[in-house]
Image (cartoon, rainbow, N blue to C red):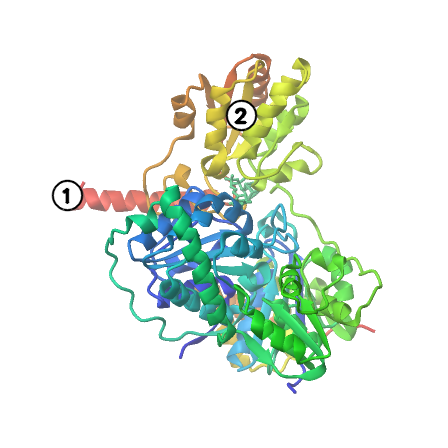
Amino acid sequence: MERRLLSGDEAVAAAAKDGGVHLGTGYPGTPSTEILETFSTLGGRAQWAPNEKVALEVALGAAFGGARALVTMKHVGLNVAADPLFTSAYTGVQGGLVIVSADDPGMASSQNEQDNRHYAEAAGLPMLEPSDSQEAYDLALAAFELSERWQLPVILRMTTRVCHSKSIVARRAGLPAPKAPAFVRDIKARVMIPAYARPAHRALRKKLEGLRIYNESSPLNVWREGSKALGVITSGVTARHVREAAPEASLLELKTVYPLPIDKLRAFAGSVERCVVVEEGDPILEVAIRAAGIPVEGKPAAFRFGELSVERVRRILARDPRPEPEPPKGKAPALCPACPYHPVYAALHKLDCIVAGDIGCYTLGVLPPYQGIDACVAMGASVGMGLGLRHVLPEQEARRVVSIIGDSTFVHSGLSGLVEMVYNPPPTGHVLIVLDNGTTAMTGQQEHPGTGRTLAHEPTTKVSIEGLARAVGVRSVDVVDPVADPAAFEKLLAERLAAPVLSVIVARRPCILAAPNIRRYEQAAEAKRAAGVEAGNV
Amino acid sequence: MSSRIVNVVLAGVGGQGVIKASDILADAAFRAGRDVKKAEIHGMSQRGGSVTTDVRFGDEVLSPMITPGEADFLVVLDPSEIAVTRSLLRAGGLLVPPDAIEEARLPNKKSLNVALLGILARALDLPEEAWRAAIHAALPERLHALNEAAFRLGRETALPRPNP
Ligand SMILES: Cc1ncc(C[n+]2csc(CCOP(=O)(O)OP(=O)(O)O)c2C)c(N)n1
Ligand code: SF4
């Protein structure tokens, strides 16, 4: 059996490969990005979708067709995909569908630390949670087994520490080979008009109760017999911290975090004198266990914030009331010195713009010297927020409002904001700057529809940002290189701000870190094309 | 119970090869038959921010993270990171600072990460062969000779004095 040192993300990719997954799709987002990248490297069929909602829909369609499908995203991505997510619990699937939600407690690289375990209960979908890379591998395979057995999508919930930590993984034979995809018509199960959705909801609740009973005796949940004085209920990487902080304690390590095996939890709590629920993030296990009438102790409110660690678990168990020490503060990331965004932020700063910003490398423009962003909330939100400001601010202020968005973000969810812009234009017009650096830089240089290359950097149809802007009816569309002539960029921006028109400025210049790679991909594509021409298959 | 776990923190700023060095160390311990866990936060490191990674090995490693004040070794690649990371080291722990190696003697500036691993190797009980294989696995072939030279340079450098 092959043993290797793998990150949690790599382990899920290996499981997808060994489990015969037909299609992996998703949208980049730390800490989930490496799953699809590794799956592709291992020879799996992996593709980036323009956003998480589309990714889930593609995977759902594949699973309706009887395939094994994997979809990956970071925690906030599941918000984008939430609409199909909830109803996919009603439709169920024909093949297998596993949705990876990579949460980021502590916000190493995110705008919030939402706890996506809430989604399992809210949507009514089974959820598994690994504590290290071996479990990420095993539970990814188990998730496909569950999904196919219960004909439901299954959520595999990971966190930054599980995704990015490396530990030893032994790969195994995988799963029984999947059936070849084939269409099976089942209109009542798949078409959610109210008449069919009502019984589907009842059927879902029945399945979940069946799953609960199944989880009661699931070998995935680990009960470690220890001291009678202290028992701990926990899940995810926290289980590892607990074993180190309190090696003597009895432990119930949950892997099936939804639906919860309540009878087992009751038995465990009853077997110890003091039973503490130690969980990272929101008190979800604690509330559910207490709601079932099982007396357990939770953690103090301060431990809802950030990641847990061995040290923090020791404090929870010791009921240590002392304030926690501040973690050492390192250097914050900043825009690369030669980043093409510098002249853009310099111009925005000089013209005293009010900037509705978005998420990507360019968010770092918020730091001194520019302090160049006034709002940043969610991907794609810059366009709508800018329009809202334009609608209500006094004219002199409204004229200073600019929306600024990256190329990947624009394709992800800026497009519907653009449609809003032409549909409900503010009286002062609006200026939207698309920062087109030819890559998704923030998450490590992934391709997107605007780069014209697939996840594996192979050529495909290139979506034109300026073409889209013109197509929806924006008349003032400029494409400029802000680095080539910063003064001209500033002049253009000033002119567009002065006129009460709708304007899109595409500031196009490759990310300096990505530029050499982009050149390589282009050369490879060119060489391939030339070889194709020679072979006569144009 | 398991034998004592060795805890190594590596620190620096984005672009210095901190993560690469931690991959080599973790792989060397893995090849030597130890249980290993390695934790890091990455995602925004290319923009010059601080990077620290934790490598732990022994018979059975549970948590992937090293508790502040419990690191046995702290290897720092950038002078600016010493002050912020020093408290991670336990009393009696060993700091390997960037100036433990004379820059002029490095085969190339980028190989500081591997040279500092060479110093660390003096204090760790991992076979030479595991180190060599880990260096080879982590780097493209054209860089093997250079990095082996950097590693040897570290190997021949005296260990700094432990943290009081
Ligand atoms: C819904 C959602 N999905 C994914 C992410 C992770 N993420 C943050 S910014 C970003 C894309 C950035 O790319 P781009 O807009 O091209 O800007 P750049 O980083 O290149 O400057 C991604 C994928 C997120 N924050 N929210
Ligand atoms: S990685 Fe690219 S886009 Fe991000 S700051 Fe550096 S140059 Fe700019």
Q: As drawn, which residue projects farthest toward the left?
A: A536
**Nearest the camera: B77 or A380?**
A380
In primary-sequence order, the first of circles 2 and 1 is: 2
Q: Is residue B136 visible?
A: no
Q: Quadrant of ligand 2?
A: top right
Residue beneath the point at 45% across and 43% down: A51
Q: Position of residue A75 (x, y in %)?
A: 55, 51
Residue kind at label 2, given as amino acid type: Leu
Name the chain under label 1: A
**Nearest the camera: A280 or A510?**
A280
Judge: label 1 CB < 8 Å from ligand 1. Answer: no
Indicate which disc residue A432 carries: 2
Q: Classify mark 2: residues with Cα within 10 Å, few (<14), some (14-19) or many (20+).
A: many
Residue beneath the point at 57% across and 57% down: A117
Tell me the distance, in whole angstroms, between the alpha carbons under discs 2 and 1. 44 Å
Q: Secondary structure at mark 2?
A: strand
